[in-house]
Amino acid sequence: MIEARIDRVVSGIRERGLDRLLVTDLTNVRYLTGFTGSNGLCVVGPDLRVFVTDFRYTEQAEDEVGGFEKVRGKQDLLADAAVYLRGRVGFDDAHLTVRSHERLQGLITAGCELVPAGGIIEELRGIKEPCELDSIRQAQRLADSVYRHVCEQGLVGRTERQVAFELEAHARRLGASGASFAPIVASGPHAALPHASPRDEPIQRGVLVIIDFGCVVDGYCSDCTRTLATGPLDEKAASVYEAVLDAQTEALSQVRGGMGKRELDATARQVLSGYGFDSYFGHGLGHGVGLEVHEAPRLAFTSEGQLSAGNVVTVEPGVYVPGELGVRIEDLVAVTETSCEILSQFPKGITTVDS
Ligand code: ZN
Ligand code: ZN
């Protein structure tokens, strides 16, 4: 499995006219080597696979890392890696700090050139292998159970922070290694902030509550949002909910390999504009999910290119009316040639939790 990944990286290296790729971002290092520690890097070339870590992780690397020559380096590791750099060396320009880049420049030998080459591995990570998809599916299944659990426990009178804590705690009880990001629990007017932090405020009756939450299983994330009602809604809240659900359902129906990312985003916006709510949808339609909760591909009105079979993305339109309310509905889907597999199973019709 990892062999095939490295072969694809080597093709990417050749396509860009590089001799070596220095991989320093830990998520990319994990993807290529299997290493889950907090200090490691690797150098890959057509005839070279070197993994460097420090003494704290040498034993762990013996277990986790296969197919690489393993080198025990100093804590900073760059000097140890520099020995293996030759010719045109691609580096992760989206992740390597300016300071590390300067240091590396001083370490490389004459005739060696550092070339920005971010995105090679991120692009590969965008297409999931079956085993990766299994982990994501499992993470989402756990998250669905966690949603059911917090609904059974009730929302009214609990603070947003208590609910957020319970989401994370229950995910761990069910075997997740944690939440894939700090959970969002935002009720009433607070839900108009798309990235609201949970407050110590009790959740009131008769409001909408955005709950955005994901789990991690085997290093892979899930991501899902539901907007729940804590009692009968007024006309405005009900119509916003209906509009978002309509936009989300329509966008989902258009997902397939070859669909333009920008066109998909536009589909949801068009539906919302029919309701007069499009100006309240300020973020992109979705994003890729995998080892990171936000990764390639992005779905936004500025995105270029098409979705591919194997992408795992969110579809999450929202309407945020400042000072009043917010609604977001987010599903996690695996893109296929002809449509998609919807991984989020928790119901999307308005769910009322009035306890
Ligand atoms: Zn989310
Ligand atoms: Zn998301």
Image (cartoon, helix red, strand yellow):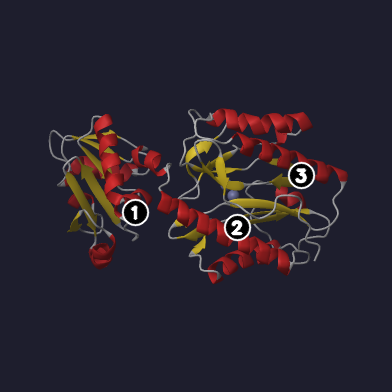
Q: Check the image and report above or below for 145 versus 11.
A: below
Checking the image for residue 183, the label placed there is 2
Q: Check the image and report above or below for 355 versus 34.
A: below
- Decide: few, some or many residues near mark 2? Use Cα within 10 Å; few <14, some 14-19, many ≥20: many
Camera sees residue 276: no
Q: Is residue 301 left or right of residue 156?
A: left
The answer to whether mark 1 and mark 3 are in CB contact below 8 A is no
What residue type is disc 2 on?
A: Pro
Residue 266 in which image quadrant: top right
Checking the image for residue 303, the label placed there is none
Q: Is residue 275 left or right of residue 36?
A: right
Q: Identify the mark nearer the N-term, 1 or 2.
A: 1
Q: Position of residue 355 (x, y in %)?
A: 80, 66
Q: Identify the mark nearer the N-term, 1 or 3.
A: 1
What residue type is disc 1 on?
A: Arg
Q: Position of residue 72 (x, y in %)?
A: 19, 60
- Residue occupying image coordinates x 27% and y 65%: 63
- Decide: few, some or many residues near mark 3? Use Cα within 10 Å; few <14, some 14-19, many ≥20: many
Q: Position of residue 26 (x, y in %)?
A: 35, 52
Camera sees residue 228: yes
Q: Secondary structure at mark 2?
A: loop
The answer to whether mark 1 and mark 2 are in CB contact below 8 A is no
Circle 3 is placed at which residue position?
Answer: 241
Circle 1 is placed at which residue position?
Answer: 30
What residue type is disc 3 on?
A: Tyr
Q: Secondary structure at mark 1?
A: helix
Residue 253 in which image quadrant: top right
Q: How many marks?
A: 3
Q: Nearer the viewer, mark 1 or mark 2?
A: 1
- Residue occupying image coordinates x 62% and y 63%: 145
Q: Nearer the viewer, mark 3 or mark 2?
A: 3
